[in-house]
Amino acid sequence: MRYAIFIVLALPTLGEIVEITPRRTRDYDERANQGWCSIRVWVDDEVNIFIEEGRVIFETVRGRPARDAGSECSQPLPRGNALSDFQFRGIDGRGEVRLIEDPGPRNRYKAWVRIRDPKGGGEEHHFRLNWKNTWTQYGAGRGGSGSGRDSGRRNDSPSRDSSGRYFDDRDRTWRMDGDGVCFYPGRDFRGDADCSRLGEDRPNMGRVRSASYQSMRVFGRVREVEVFDQEDYRGANARLSRDERDLSRVRNNRGDSLPGRVQSYRVR
């Protein structure tokens, strides 16, 4: 009689994602003309690290899940024309630390760093990002609070980025100039907005960005925003035609609330 012997090995969790908000430095200032982030992360094998605006994402490729070891930033990583003179510097750690992509329009201003440390046992790694913040919209513009269907016209003209978004200093929120939609990481349109113009469809938002959406605001002539829970406009969907202060109250056609389920969308 033959016996089949199965040996079960403990395999690492692939693609495990952890998102953190780095600690603010004592001199934290979104208006400062220079900024930096010092990223400290414990790595057991291979990890992708994404720095986008005010958050840092650890995606474990191999090994035990990466964890933060005291990262801090002096301001959010700027977007659009605000960002210039971006620099990367590896500081400490036995593994290979490489900048894979600078932040720019192609990746929506997200820095991508990869750390490989195959020696086993895990170790803390440290790298630093520096940049100049040439965007003057912080505190520069004054605008009415208005409703979500705002034409974007203001008596003053704070600087816009490539998507047309700008910071309204009076009500302390991001808005959009012209026709489009903005998604926000906080309820009541709070946090650093992710905006798209009318007709600018987004086929792949990525699960990390999608998980952060908590509210949505429409501007100008936008009639409808159709959101999908899968990439390439597939899966369950919902049609939104007005401002939504809390997306957890909105359901798609399968009855699921929207936070974490906006993988792609169309703006009409």
Image: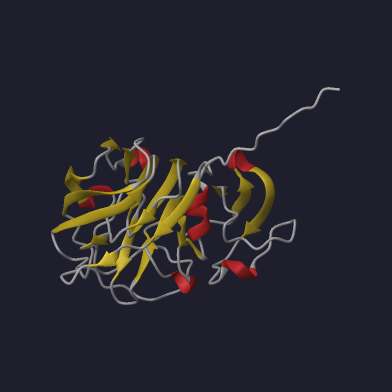
Q: Is residue 179 visible?
A: no
Q: Nearer the viewer, residue 136 or 115?
A: 115
Q: Nearer the viewer, residue 109 or 161?
A: 109
Q: Residue at x 34, y 64 (%)?
A: 153
Answer left or right for 82 relative to 209: left
* 122 is higher (above) or lower (below) than 189: above
Answer left or right for 137 relative to 208: left
Residue 106 location (% of width, % of height)? 35, 37
Name the quadrant containing residue 75.
bottom left
The total number of labels drawn is 0
Determine the residue located farthest toward the front in the rendered image. 1
Q: Quarter holding the N terminus?
A: top right
* 127 is higher (above) or lower (below) than 170: above
Q: Nearer the viewer, residue 169 or 51?
A: 51
Residue 235 location (% of width, % of height)? 69, 45
Residue 236 location (% of width, % of height)? 70, 50
* 53 is higher (above) or lower (below) than 30: above
Name the quadrant containing residue 133.
bottom left
Answer left or right for 257 relative to 163: right
Q: Is residue 63 visible?
A: yes
Coloring scheme of the render?
A: secondary structure
Residue 194 location (% of width, % of height)? 42, 55
Determine the residue located farthest toward the right in the rendered image. 1
